[in-house]
Image (tube, grey):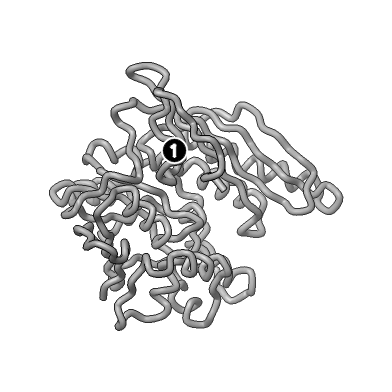
Amino acid sequence: MLAKLPKTRDARLIVGTEHSDDAGVYKLRADLAIVNTVDFFPPIVDDPYEFGRIAAANALSDVYAMGAKPITVLNIVGFPSATLDVSVLAEILRGGAERAAAAGAVVVGGHTVDDKELKYGMAVTGQVHPKRVVKNGGARAGDVLVLTKPLGTGIVASGIKRGATDEHEERAATASMVALNDIAGAALTRYKARACTDITGFGLAGHGAEMAAASKEVRLVFEAAVLPLLPGTARLAEAGFLTGGGGRNEEFLGRKLSIAKGIEETTAAVLVDPQTSGGLLVSLPARQAPGYVEALHKRGLRPAVIGRVVARPARSPVLVAAE
């Protein structure tokens, strides 16, 4: 669809749609650029307040993935006024406002339409120095790959909808989705991150493929044994609580993804599992990765080194899942 649209040409546009980056970046001055992104979706949990917090954290994440700081947000709402009381919307907006405040951003307004299906999200504006923008391209052979949140939100959410999860699993998934990527994002330039993307609807493999393609002539190698998972993810995946989005991600990737024969089907499912408000996938020089991981650990996060970047042989997969 985007290929059919006219190309945007402006010397001040630092990041556009060329490489499926997480947000657009536009230069205002030599020392200031603005970052723009938008994201919204239907409820993933029953609690309206928590849904608002999750949707807001998810939208804000795109700005953090660029190494930027969010400054203002606009609410975007589709609300079924014929079937839901407006008190539900009030709670959703309260949750979104809480996450915006936690991010240091200001809610400046929004727009609501009457819709058959409830939807909520945000358009976010951030700021960054033009020379400190982190893109999803730039990974180099020899880099280390760090993931800042565990995987499995899609699988666990599927289990929640079908009553197959316990309270601990639900709390852990919600807490992960509500958590901002602010700390991980703020440390990107300090530890000289070469590339970054946040893991959302296309899953780890889908967004990893975008990173590899944008970086050119490299492939990402994920070590299946060390992938961090949310509580209950492996059990639920084995029981078949998968998502339609995961299947579509796998189909879209096709031969771009090569999975070692010894890897279990549940692990393969996690690779393509659509994430909501997932963590950052960061490519760092090998000498910088330990410092980045330690810095995040000290702030209470659970980052994990999940693989490496290698040179890509011609006409070979851009992603490899190794044992």
Q: Position of residue 303 (x, y in %)?
A: 31, 55
The outermost residue toward the right is 82
- What kind of residue is marked 1? Val
Is residue 269 visible to us here? yes
Residue at 44 percent of width and 36 percent of height: 16
Q: Nearer the viewer, residue 258 or 177?
A: 258
The outermost residue toward the left is 287
In the rendered image, which quarter contains the C terminus? bottom left
When the figure is inspected, residue 15 is found, relative to residue 214, above or below; the finding is: above
Residue at 41 percent of width and 55 percent of height: 207
Q: Nearer the viewer, residue 216 or 135?
A: 216
Q: Secondary structure at mark 1?
A: helix
Which residue is the site of mark 1?
A: 63
Residue at 48 percent of width and 28 percent of height: 71
When the figure is inspected, residue 231 is found, relative to residue 282, above or below; the finding is: below
Estimate how packed mark 1 is, as few (under 14), some (14 to 19) or many (20 or more) residues with alpha carbons within 10 Å.
Answer: many
Left or right of residue 80, residue 185 in this image: left
Q: Position of residue 163 (x, y in %)?
A: 63, 74
Residue at 44 percent of width and 73 percent of height: 269
Q: Position of residue 304 (x, y in %)?
A: 28, 59
Q: Position of residue 6 (x, y in %)?
A: 54, 35
Which quadrant of the view contains residue 188? top left
Left or right of residue 264, residue 9 in this image: right
Q: Nearer the viewer, residue 30 or 85?
A: 30
Is residue 104 visible to us here? no
